[in-house]
């Protein structure tokens, strides 16, 4: 199964269906099921933005080094002026990503929190997890 690693609290925001768009500097042609992995990098609890984003979560304790959700990657949209204007109508989503002309919006749907997280180190890009 393909996997996308996100830093916390962004992985938990996706897993809890608060964040539905992952923003990236690169596009992907992949569409389909994808695991969401919470990376090993620790949250900067002193960062005001991070502090605020954690308030959206019922469990503000970040997960680290675990695959925590499964989603369906349905689209990858180039961020042009029209898209950037449209995203302003969704302040929570806007706050949860890096929206800038020339970047890409990866649209995630059908997100399911895993009942039992899967320990994994993670990698850059889209990577593969094989059950042992």
Image (cartoon, grey):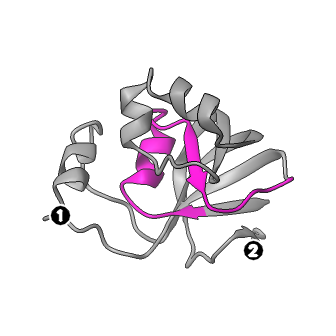
**Frontmost residue, 132 versus 90:** 90
Q: Position of residue 55 (x, y in %)?
A: 21, 40
Residue at image position (55%, 79%) is: 121
Quarter of the figure with the N terminus: bottom right
Q: Nearer the viewer, mark 1 or mark 2?
A: 1
Gap in angstroms between the C-alphas marked 1 and 2: 34 Å
Q: Which mark is residue 7?
A: none
In the figure, residue 128 lies in which quadrant?
Answer: bottom right
In the figure, residue 40 lies in which quadrant?
Answer: bottom left
Earlier along the polypeptide chain: callout 1 or callout 2?
Answer: 1
Residue at image position (23%, 68%) is: 44
**Frontmost residue, 97 versus 3:** 97
Whether 129 is drawn above or below 109: the answer is below
**Frontmost residue, 72 versus 94:** 94
- Circle 1: is it few (<14), some (14-19), or many (20+) Cα within 10 Å? few
In the figure, residue 94 lies in which quadrant?
Answer: top left
Residue 14 is one of the magenta-drawn residues: yes
Extreme front residue here? 81
Residue named by callout 1: 45
Q: Is residue 87 left or right of residue 105?
A: left
Residue range corresponding to the magenta coloring: 5-29
Q: Position of residue 131 (x, y in %)?
A: 75, 68
Q: Position of residue 106 (x, y in %)?
A: 67, 45
Number of numbered discs present? 2
Residue at image position (26%, 55%) is: 61
Q: Is residue 28 left or right of residue 14?
A: right
Q: Is residue 56 left or right of residue 18?
A: left
Residue named by callout 2: 132
Q: Is residue 11 left or right of residue 24?
A: left
Whether 99 is drawn above or below 26: the answer is above
């Amino acid at each position: 199964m393909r996997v996308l690693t996100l830093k916390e609290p962004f992985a938990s925001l996706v897993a809890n269906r608060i964040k539905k768009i992952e923003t990236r500097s690169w596009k992907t042609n992949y569409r389909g099921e994808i695991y969401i992995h919470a990376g090993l990098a620790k949250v900067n609890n002193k960062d005001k933005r991070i502090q605020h984003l954690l308030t959206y979560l019922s469990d503000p304790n970040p997960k680290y080094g675990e695959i925590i959700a499964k989603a369906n990657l349905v689209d990858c949209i180039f961020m042009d002026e029209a898209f950037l204007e449209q995203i302003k109508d969704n302040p929570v989503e806007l706050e949860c990503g890096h929206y800038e002309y020339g970047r890409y919006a990866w649209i995630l749907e059908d997100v399911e929190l895993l009942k039992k997280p899967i320990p994994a180190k993670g990698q850059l890009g889209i990577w593969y997890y094989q059950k042992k």
